[in-house]
Every structure is written in structure tokens, then in C-alpha cells.
Amino acid sequence: MDSECGDEFHHFATDAIHAGYKPSDSQSKAVIPSICLSTVFKLDEPQTGTEFVYSRTHNPSRKILEQALAAIEGAKHAFCFASGLGAATTMTYLLQSGDNIVCASNIYGGTFCLLSEMLPRFGVQTTFVDFTKMESLVAALKDKKPKMVWFEIVTNPTLHIIDARAVIKSTRDIVPEAIIIVDNTFLTPYYSKPLDLGADLVLHSLTKYINGHSDVVMGSLALNDDSMAKKFRRFQNNLGIIPSPFDCYQVNRGLKTLHIRMKQHDKNALVVAEFLEKHPKIERVLYPGLESHPQHHLARTLMKGYGGVISFYVKGDYQHTRRFLKSLKVITLAFSLGSFESLAEFPATMTHSTMSQEERLKIDITDNLVRLSVGLESAEDIIADLDEALKTK
Ligand SMILES: *Cc1c(COP(=O)(O)O)cnc(C)c1O
């Protein structure tokens, strides 16, 4: 894919590495920013109005990370929160009682619980719709007149592609004032920039690819609108769902190599997906980078790469799949995705266990579906591990 994306990626890499901090910003000229642990900042006058007052309100380590995130997203503003779900929770404070949300039915489980269980107690209702069916979406937009429209371009775990351009166009036509949110965790700004497609807000679980080292939980929002940005700075202060300076330092360090890691995740995932597709003990492989993916061509028009997540159906039943998962040696059986190490998970009893079996089956989460976050180990070893584990199943 490299040849298709040339210069823009050069720019991305330079932003990732340099945006947010210059050595001359520091008194010591330290090349790497120090972590500002101070919770309070000295004032020259007995009044507020200076940039740093109290660390919940704003903090220099958070500022560096937020500027780097805005730069790689091509956004005017970015804000960090204590987790991806914390960013989502904060975002819902743009709403008030009586407002509606229209959300894709195939959405991250934590988002589903936030919208379906937490928000109704404050009088905010969410309608979940299959965003791959435009006529259902259009009907819901007309009927509910939502204040927010919320989706992910690549759905989890079945890796369907939502036609973000078509969704955004319909939303603008029917409810021009609605705030359009794209959770871009799976693709990262390296492979997709939803603000350029016309979204208003981009949500990330930085816990996944952007930090990329399985050692920080954090989330972010990126946006261009100045008045909404002012609200988010206030929300950070008033809701307090903020990350620690140490974690900000870690995520800033992680994102310096995001472009290199994403390229390799993408390469490894394609090789592994092609291997699995030919394997006699595999029923079916889902990866938008495969020619066989029913929406491969749509994916190509929406994203510059496909990321490192693959899902596949093992031939056989739950017991076969369980034995396969327990036999993996290089790949770790664990929740989460997007880190340098390969992780496998079993949606039916792990990430999607809060859904009823009936709901799960409706979206093809069967007892032989495995999701794999392909890491940065050598692809040969990942493949050998899968091959061995499939023999024992
Ligand atoms: C993990 C994840 C989240 C939630 O982020 P946390 O950092 O775990 O709170 C939201 N959306 C997607 C797509 C995710 O994968």
C-alpha cells in the first residue's frame, strides 16, 4: 500500500515524532519531555486565567500528548480522558434529557452498555440500527431526529465495513445539526481520518494501537469545532475523567512509532489471513484486506490500510475452538487488541458475553468464531503457532 500514500505518510511520521514538544520548550533543553507530576502551579496574581492552575484542569504532560494527537488526526483540537469509555461518557454530556442517539447496532460492547444502560436513567434514549442497511438508518434518522449519530467504520468482531461517506451524507441531509461520531480505534488516524470524511468527533481508545504496548488505559476525542472544544476543556475539569501525567507520557512515547507499527500489523495480518483462508480446518476468514471480503472494494475507498484484526470461524464446535485457543503458545488468549504482541479472544464468552445468544447469533458471533489481534512477532512464528494449535483441536 505504501506507494499509494507517499507524502502524506511522511508528514504523518514527522507529526507523530515532533508535534507537541520541542527541546527548546524546556529550560534544560531535554530532547524528551519530562513528566510534570505537580498537581498545582504557582500564580503571579491571586486569580485564575493562566494556562496551568491545577492538574485536573490542565497539565503540561497532557498538553503535549493532546497536541500530538491533534496533529496526527489532522484536527484542530484533541482531548484525553481516563479511558476510551471515559471519552465516550464525557461526550454524552453534550446532550440533555429528551435527546436521542442513533447508534450502529454492531458497536463496541462498552459503548453499547453506556448507551443502553447508563444514559436512559438521564432521559437520553438510543436507537440501535444496522448501519450497513441504509434504508433502516434513513428511517431511524427521520423518526428519531437524533442529536448524535455514532458508529465504527470497521465493526467488531465480524469486520463489516460501514460506508462512512454514505452514512454522513444521509445524516447531513436528514438531521443537519446532529453530531456525527466515529469511533476510529480499529483503524487509527494512520489508516483513516473520519474528520476528513465529514464526521464531527473522532473517538479513540488509546489503550489499543495508539499506545500500542498494553500498558496504559486511555481515550481521546479529536475535533475541529472551536466552541465544542471549549466545552470539552470544561468537561475535563468538571467531570474529572482525566488521565495521569505518567500515562500521558507513555502514550506520547507509544505514538511516535504508530506509523511503523501499523504498517507491520497490516502486513502480518494479511499474510496470516491468507494462510488461514487456505487452511483445511478453517471455515471462513474475515479480514477487509482480503480480496474475498465482500466489502473489500468499499474498504479500499475508505481506508489506507486494514489494521491487524482478523476474525475467523474454526471448523467444528465450541469444544474444538476452546482446545485450539488453549493450545496457542506465541499468541496469548486475552481481551483487547492493538498491541505489539498477538492476542486471541473468543467473542461469544469474552468480549460479547453480555449479549444474549440470540443477539449474538444475529450478528454471526457463533461458538466457533475467534478474533485475532495480529501482533508484530514474525509472521512465520504466528502462522506456525496457529498451524500447531489447529492440529490439536
Ligand atoms: C477498547 C475499545 C473502546 C473502549 O476503550 P477503553 O480504553 O477500554 O475504555 C472503545 N471502542 C473500541 C472500538 C474499543 O476497541
Image (cartoon, rainbow, N blue to C red):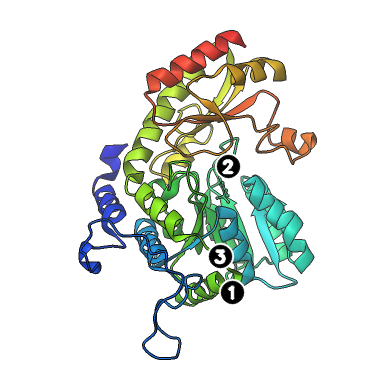
Which residue carries the number 1 mark?
238
Tag 3: residue type? Answer: Arg
Query: If the image is split into quadrants, where does the C terminus sit?
Result: top right
Tag 1: residue type? Answer: Asn
Q: Secondary structure at mark 3?
A: helix
Which residue carries the number 2 mark?
155
Residue occupying image coordinates x 70% and y 28% = 366
Mark 3–mark 2 Cα distance, whole angstroms, equals 22 Å
Mark 1–mark 3 Cα distance, whole angstroms, equals 31 Å
Where residue 198 is drawn, which disc sits there? Answer: none
Image quadrant in which you'd find residue 33: bottom left
Please tell me whether mark 2 or mark 1 is closer to you in this view: 1
Instruction: Give the mark nearest the N terminus, 3 or 2.
Output: 2
Instruction: Give the mark nearest the N terminus, 2 or 1.
Output: 2
Residue furthest bottom as drawn: 46
Please tell me whether mark 3 or mark 2 is closer to you in this view: 2
Asked whether mark 2 and ligand 1 are closer than 8 Å, the reply comes as no
Q: Position of residue 65 (x, y in %)?
A: 39, 60
Q: Position of residue 358 (x, y in %)?
A: 79, 35
Which residue is more in the foreground, 292 or 147? Answer: 147
Image quadrant in which you'd find residue 321: top right
Neighbour tally class for label 3: few under 14, some 14-19, many 20 plus, Cα within 10 Å: some
Which residue is more in the foreground, 170 or 15? Answer: 15
Which residue is more in the foreground, 76 or 52? Answer: 52
Neighbour tally class for label 1: few under 14, some 14-19, many 20 plus, Cα within 10 Å: few
Which residue carries the number 3 mark?
172
Q: Position of residue 292 (x, y in %)?
A: 50, 26
